[in-house]
C-alpha cells in the first residue's frame, strides 16, 4: 500500500542535520533510521531551508535542526514520480512550513 508520512518527527537522522546546541544521542538517531528502514520509508528530497526548526535563541545558544520531513515508500513514489517538497522560511513559528507539490502525469 502506498504511504506518505510527514510532520515533526522530533528526531534527526544524522548529526549533519543539526547546527549548534548539545550533541544528539547517536543511538536515538540510529533507532530513528532503523525504524524508517524497517517500515520501508525513505526521506523525500527537498528544496528551501536546510533546517526546519529553531529554538529562537541567538549566538551560541541558537540551535537549528531538521526535524520536519516527508517520508514515503516505493509504492507512493511510483505513483507520484514528480512529487517535490519545499521547506519555506520560518516567520513567527519555530518550524518551517513544508509544502508538498504533487503530479502523477507527464504534463
Image: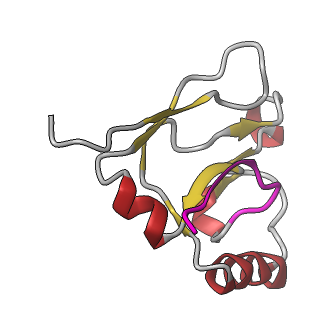
Q: At 83% across and 35% down in the image, what residue appears?
A: 55
Nearest to the observer: residue 74 or residue 91: 74
Q: Nearer the viewer, residue 9 or 73?
A: 73
Indicate whether 18 appears above or below 90: below
Residue 3 among those drawn in magenta: yes
Q: Which residue is farthest top?
A: 92
Question: The C terminus lies in which quarter of the figure?
Answer: top left
Q: Magenta region: which residues?
A: 1-12
Residue at 80% over, 67% down: 23
| Quadrant of res 72 | bottom right
Q: Position of residue 47 (x, y in %)?
A: 40, 40
User: Can you tell which quarter of the image residue 90 is in?
Assistant: top right
Rendered position, 76 above or below 14: above
Q: Position of residue 12 (x, y in %)?
A: 71, 63
Q: Residue furthest left?
A: 107
Q: Is residue 82 left or right of residue 79?
A: left
Closest to the observer: 7 or 64? 7
Location of residue 83 in the rendering, given as x and y in whole percent from the top left corner: 37, 45
- 73 to 95, vertically: above or below: below
Q: How many marks?
A: 0
Q: Is residue 71 magenta?
A: no
- The residue positioned farthest toward the front in the image shown: 1
Q: Position of residue 68 (x, y in %)?
A: 68, 46
The quarter of the rendered structure image containing the N terminus is bottom right
Give the residue drawn at x 23%, y 42%. Answer: 105
Q: Residue at x 81, y 68 (%)?
A: 24
Q: Is residue 82 above or below residue 1?
A: above
- Which colour scheme appears in the figure? secondary structure
Amino acid at each position: 500500500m502506498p504511504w506518505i508520512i510527514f510532520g515533526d518527527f522530533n528526531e534527526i537522522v544524522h548529526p549533519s542535520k543539526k547546527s549548534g546546541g548539545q550533541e544528539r544521542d547517536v543511538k536515538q538517531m540510529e533507532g530513528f533510521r532503523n525504524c524508517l528502514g524497517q517500515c520501508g520509508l525513505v526521506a523525500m528530497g527537498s528544496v528551501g531551508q536546510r533546517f526546519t526548526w529553531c529554538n529562537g535563541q541567538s549566538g551560541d545558544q541558537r540551535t537549528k535542526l531538521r526535524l520536519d520531513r516527508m517520508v514515503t515508500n516505493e509504492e507512493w513514489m511510483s505513483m507520484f514520480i514528480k512529487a517535490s517538497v519545499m521547506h519555506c522560511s520560518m516567520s513567527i513559528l519555530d518550524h518551517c512550513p513544508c509544502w508538498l507539490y504533487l503530479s502523477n502525469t507527464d504534463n
